[in-house]
Structure formats: structure tokens, C-alpha cells
Image (spheres, rainbow, N blue to C red):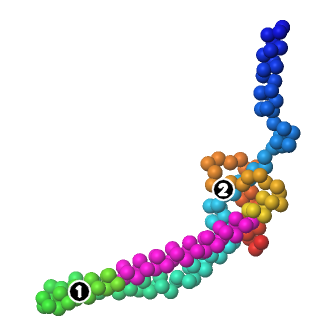
Amino acid sequence: MKGWLRIASAFLPVALALAPPAAQAQELKLGYVNSERILRDSAPARAAAQKLETEFAKRDRELQDMGQKLKAAAERFEKDAPVLAEAERNKRQRELAEMDRELQRRQREFREDLNQRRNEELQALLDRAQRIVRQIAEQEKFDLIVQDAVFFSPRVDITEKVLRALNNGK
């Protein structure tokens, strides 16, 4: 019996140290936000996409027109090439090459500008969504909110609350 007491008294401090205090026994309140849904389904995301489309529509049409003109000029050249003089053929080839370089340069600038503006709009939306997530976390006393998790239970998904707040303009 003395051996048993000795073992129990040795393990008692360890067991007490590992036992959670009453304050820590409280459950953590966790939340999850699906940022893809926020960027896809929120009214501000759709408005930003529409804004970008409107902003870049004219340049897009101009590029399409340039592409059609280049194609038509190339077709004319192919048709006329057999009867053109060597000097005229070389001149038109250089003109076509210059038109192609100009079109490619403008397309590249267009893509760069569009990507930059899209990133600006997305960053503004993400910043706004982050503020809303923080407000929800503070109001509802969340301990941790994660986004883009590998797995989550629907009961911790607060994406719909964030979407509602974004759509209401909070």
C-alpha cells in the first residue's frame, strides 16, 4: 500500500498541472470565411468587375479593330504578293511586321493595365472584407477566424454573414 501511495503522490502534481483551469476549460469559438466566395459572389465584387469592363471596353474594341486591320492587310498582301515588285513586297512586309509589333505592344500594355486595376479593385474589396470579418469577430466574440482552410465544418462558416454585410454596404 505504501508503494501505491508513493506512485499516486508522484503523479498527482503532474495530473494537476495538466488539468486545465476553469477559465481555460471554455470552448474556443472558431469561424471560417471563404474568400473565393467573397470575391465571386459579393455585390462589390460584381460591381468592380462591371466597372473594369466599362473602363477597358474602349481599349479592347480598339485592339480588336487593330487585329482585324492587320488580318485584312496580311490577306491583301498574300493575294497581291505574286504580282508585286520586290521593293514593294519588302516594303509591305515591313509595314505588316510593324503593325504586328504595335498590336502586340498595345495588347501587352492593355493586359498590364487591366491586371493592375483588377488587383487594385480586389485589394480594396479584400481590405473591406477584412474589416467586416474583424467587426464580426469582435461583436460575436470569436477566438479565431480562418480563411481558405483545407477542411471546415459548415457550422463555423461565417461567409454568408460577411457577404450580407458587404452587400449591405457596411
Q: Amino acid at mark 1?
A: Arg
Secondary structure, mark 2, is strand
Q: Nearer the viewer, mark 2 or mark 1?
A: 2
Q: Residue 11: in sight, yes or no?
A: yes
The picture quadrant where one finds residue 119 is bottom right
Quadrant that contains the N terminus: top right
Judging depth in this view, the residue of 64 and 59 nearest the camera is 59
Judging depth in this view, the residue of 61 and 15 nearest the camera is 15
- On the picture, is 26 further left or further right than 131? right
Residue drawn 22% across and 83% down? 78
* Label disc, if present, on residue 147 of the rendered structure: 2
113 shown above or below 40: below
68 shown above or below 21: below
The magenta stretch is 103-132
Verify whether residue 128 appears in magenta.
yes
Residue 57 in picture, x, y percent from top left: 52, 83
Give the overall secondary structure of the magenta segment.
Answer: helix
Q: Amino acid at mark 2?
A: Gln
Residue 88 in picture, x, y percent from top left: 17, 91
Residue 127 in picture, x, y percent from top left: 67, 69
- On the picture, is 169 further left or further right than 76? right
Verify whether residue 123 appears in magenta.
yes
Residue 93 in picture, x, y percent from top left: 22, 85
